Image (cartoon, rainbow, N blue to C red):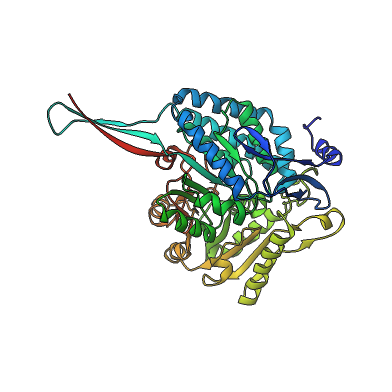
Amino acid sequence: MAYATKTGMQEWLDTIQPKVYGNFINGEWTESSSGKTFSINNSANNKKELASFQDSTEVDVNQAVEAAHKAFKNWSMVPGPDRGAILYRFADLLEKSVDELSFILSAEQGKTLAESKGEIFRAAKEARFCAGEAFRIEGNTMPGERNNVWSSTLRKPLGVIAAIAPWNFPVVTPVRKIAPALAYGCTVVYKPASVTPWTSARLMELLDEAGTPKGVVNLVVGSGSRVGNPLVNHPLVKGISFTGSTALGVQINQIAARRFAKTQLELGGKNPAVVLDYDDAQSVAKQIVSAAFACSGQRCTSISRVIVVKEKKEELTEAIIKEMREIKVGAAWEEDITMGPLVNQQHLKSVLEYLKIGQEEGARIRFGGDVLTNGLFADGAYMVPALLDLVTPEMRVAKEEIFGPVLAVIEVEDKEQAFSVANDVEYGLAASIFTNNLSTAYRFADQVESGMVHINHGTASAAHMPFGGVKQSGFGAFSIGSSNVDFFTEMKVVYFQY
């Protein structure tokens, strides 16, 4: 099958014969002990069935954890460069499979083919960075406080890791958890979101092809209650890396704390773009719109609040609307599409409810917000991205994560109020500021309550830089960069008298 073109994707969808995928446990594809499966459909056309997956139980979780625990004894002893070599091969396989994987990703999640390909290439970059980290598991040697005593610190792999990923980035998020785990000598039991498990099955195949030993990476598909809960509760699981909602992250952290398991939590966001001054309103609007509506606004790092000084508010709002008019909504395979559907009708309903709440509170829909239902649109969860103005800082649409294509404009008097409003939420993941004043930019970077700060550009991250948030946006070691060592390893101190 040729995967090179958008037309090819449409033809591919027409010829799909839904396949039943098993769990991947100890290097083998196995059926669930429940004997039950569930199906997923195409996000762009929910009448089209794509594949079926195991409706797993605690029995399956136990089998996977025990396999990972057994594999850890050998895998943790494999030299770092050899572990890294497997990750380098895996990264190459990701890139080699980019067309096929992007079709699968766009079919189950809904994002455009360009976004899917970008996600896969990003996953390959992150895997390569982690492969290099396997060569750099550093300790320290320090002068002894007594004669003839050599003192040092070592980093040892933590053990079995529970990796739990969301539906919005079903390739890069699991890679972001699995690759560092393997680099540092840990083993993994991975639970994907039930909405988007298809790419995960393909990732297991590629990891196997790259030479990952049996039991080192395991996949168990199923609901949060029947798979996620027993996985988090399992006594052999030493660390939980979770990306998802803040509410669920709090529950996981409470469970883990009772048995002193480590957590790495990437949670929600309500990310501000503070706009104080600029040379070109349109260039600022382009940065904001790109960061707000990528992945149909279904990103934890999406800009969702524009906090702009009064004298710039109207000019910037018009510039943002101009950029939003250029967004073309449609199915992934259509030409010139820049925004796909939301993941499903249930999520669309949630986003529309927030638009209703905003209007009831006094906000105005300045642009968009329409549900698209004609023709092909009738078979997916499509909407025109929405811009709200007349939003005040205390409104729910200014404080709560909507996780969809909705952008709120909040007018302020000056930069002092702008900084205050930026911090006046429970979240602290990413924040942007647009200003020509160097002192103001540094002051914002210093004072904003956010794990990541962006000066004069949108909320894009890099494949080698730590990624994470503060307040209710995250807990534990940041992911992606060198900070991963703080989660996937534990320190050991050695005193040697000679």
Relative image position of residue 456 (x, y in whole percent) = 51, 49
Relative image position of residue 253 (x, y in whole percent) = 46, 56
Residue drawn at 62 percent across, 58 percent down: 403
Q: Is residue 211 above or below residue 302?
A: above
Q: Is residue 467 above or below residue 391?
A: above
Residues 15 and 295: in front is 15
Residues 107 and 261: in front is 261
Q: Is residue 446 above or below residue 203?
A: below
Q: Is residue 156 left or right of residue 35?
A: left
Q: Is residue 472 left or right of residue 96?
A: left
**Is residue 488 in sight in this rendering?**
yes
Q: Is residue 109 left or right of residue 176?
A: right
Relative image position of residue 267 (x, y in whole percent) = 52, 54
Q: Quadrant of the N terminus?
A: top right
Residue drawn at 64 percent across, 26 percent down: 209
Relative image position of residue 360 (x, y in whole percent) = 64, 76
Q: Quadrant of the C terminus?
A: top left
Residue located farthest toward the left when viewing the structure as drawn: 147
Residue drawn at 42 percent across, 57 percent down: 449
